[in-house]
Amino acid sequence: MLQRSGEQLPWQPATAVNEQPHDMPAPEIQRKNYFSAPHFYCVETICAPCGTVIAWAKFAKSESPTNILHFLESIYPTEESRPDYICIDKACLVLRTAVANGSWDAVWKNTTRFIVDSYHYTNHRTTDELCRKWCNPAPQDGSAPNLVVVDRDKFGRPYYKRAFNTQVLYCIQFY
């Protein structure tokens, strides 16, 4: 039997819909028992530019910038271990939070720059100066020379391009 989208037949159990807005705290759910599998808000992964998964963590209630910073600090505890760039869809929010809570000066400022992946960068507000200046994945002001390189088209004319693609090229699945 085929079921149409949104169709609820009388013999089917009601399905719960997650009404939680993205990145907002989830209410505590009182359970009658704890014999069912718990649910997590999301799984956050850290991947190398080649696509290799470096680390992952389950986020129980939200993917907040504070949770992301705690996760990053647990994976990169020392200056020597921190990468030059962390590319994340909400880099400007993570940067704003790091500046506000003091972890920018204490932890990240000397080692790492948070950049937005190219897909999400096009959707960020043009009026957001912090995002445009510090989270740009391809700045042409010379502030990040290893993110932008000069290449030549088929006619030999020079043009700027990103040094590496910040988009996911393939998906890794675990079974």
Image (tube, helix red, strand yellow):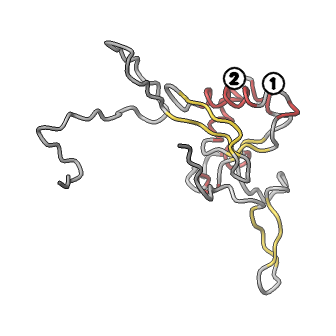
Is 150 or 124 nearer to us in this picture?
150
Q: Quick one: label 1 or label 2, which is nearer the N terminus?
A: 2
Q: In the image, what residue type sits under mark 2?
A: Asn
Is 27 or 136 nearer to us in this picture?
27
**Residue 21 quadrant:** top left
Q: In the image, what residue type sits under mark 1?
A: Ala
**Residue 53 quadrant:** top right
In the rendering, at what x and y percent does residue 174 appear? Answer: 56, 44
In the rendering, at what x and y percent does residue 144 appear? Answer: 83, 52
Numbered circle sitting on residue 101:
2
* Residue furthest out toward the left: 10
| Separation of residues labelled 1 and 2 (CA atoms) | 10 Å
Pointer 1: what residue? 106
In the rendering, at what x and y percent does residue 132 appear? Answer: 68, 49
- Callout 1 crowding tier (Cα within 10 Å): few <14, some 14–19, many ≥20: few
Secondary structure type for disc 1: helix
Does residue 13 sit above or below 9 in this rendering? above
Secondary structure type for disc 2: helix
Q: Are marks 1 and 2 in contact (CB under 8 Å)?
A: no
Is 153 left or right of 132, judged from the image as shown? right
- Callout 2 crowding tier (Cα within 10 Å): few <14, some 14–19, many ≥20: few
* Residue furthest out toward the right: 80
**Residue 93 quadrant:** top right
Question: Residue at (86%, 31%) from the top-left corner?
Answer: 79
- Quarter of the picture containing the N terminus is bottom left
Is 50 left or right of 2, judged from the image as shown? right
Question: Residue at (74%, 23%) from the top-left corner?
Answer: 102
Question: Residue at (84%, 56%) from the top-left corner?
Answer: 146
Does residue 23 sit above or below 86 in this rendering? above
Is 30 or 119 nearer to us in this picture?
30
